[in-house]
Amino acid sequence: MNESSPVPARSGVPLTDDQAASEAARIIADAYRPAPAVPTSYRDTSPLPAHGDMPPVVQPGVPPMSQRAVDASRLMLTAGLATVPPGLIAIGVLVASRQADPTVIGMICAAPAAVAVPVLALARLFRRIGEAAPDEHHHHYSGSVRQEHTTTHTRGLFARTHNDHRR
């Protein structure tokens, strides 16, 4: 049997040259035939509801928070992680110098918290004292007076406040 001649899959009988040529032409024609159009995307054109009656579902992971809370929590995590390498270095130095007394390590680790707690408590106390007693202004005028008080809270790097109240 000649290995270059195609053999049908079900029988061991080799094809004749005419059969092999027609089978080769069929295979080549199948290869160049365009594939049927298969959709790769779908657009649902049905109208979406303006609002639904289903409450939002809490997703796994970080709970939903405002952007300000997210920024603050990321800052706290980053600052907390930034203290790990210096602490590990200090413990490594103590262990290497054979001065790793548990009392000394406890005092070194507790010292920042022992200093920070009273400082933060005093800062909070001073802030509350300032908020508890607002300034009292006394103005004495002779004649007609038009008084207008405007309070604005503008936040942002490129924020702009317009305080032009012409009437």
Image: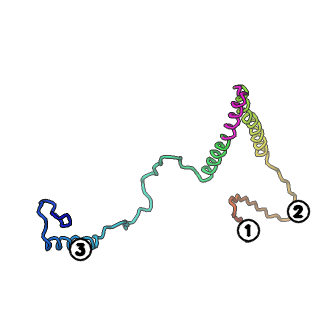
Q: Which residue is mark 1?
A: 165
- Would you say residue 90 sits in the magenta stretch? yes
- The count of marks equals 3
Circle 1 Cα neighbour tier, 10 Å, few/some/many (<14 / 14–19 / ≥20):
few
Q: CA distance from mark 2 to mark 1?
A: 24 Å
- Would you say residue 93 sits in the magenta stretch? yes
Q: Nearer the viewer, residue 164 or 161?
A: 161
Q: Which residue is mark 2?
A: 142
Q: CA distance from mark 2 to mark 3?
A: 104 Å
Dividing the picture into quarters, in which one does residue 84 lie?
Answer: top right
Q: Is residue 51 left or right of residue 98?
A: left
Start and end of the magenta stretch? 85-101
Could you tell me the amino acid type at mark 2? Ser
Q: Residue at x 69, y 40 (%)?
A: 86
Q: Could you say which disc has been placed on residue 85 in the image?
A: none
Q: CA distance from mark 3 to mark 1?
A: 80 Å
Could you tell me the amino acid type at mark 3? Ala
- In the picture shown, does residue 148 fall above or below 129? below
Q: Is residue 32 left or right of residue 89?
A: left
Q: What kind of element bears circle 3?
A: helix
Residue 115 on image: x %, y %: 76, 35
Residue 29 on image: x %, y %: 23, 74
The quarter of the rendered structure image containing the N terminus is bottom left
Q: Residue at x 86, y 65 (%)?
A: 143
Q: What kind of element bears circle 1?
A: loop
- Colouring used for the render: rainbow
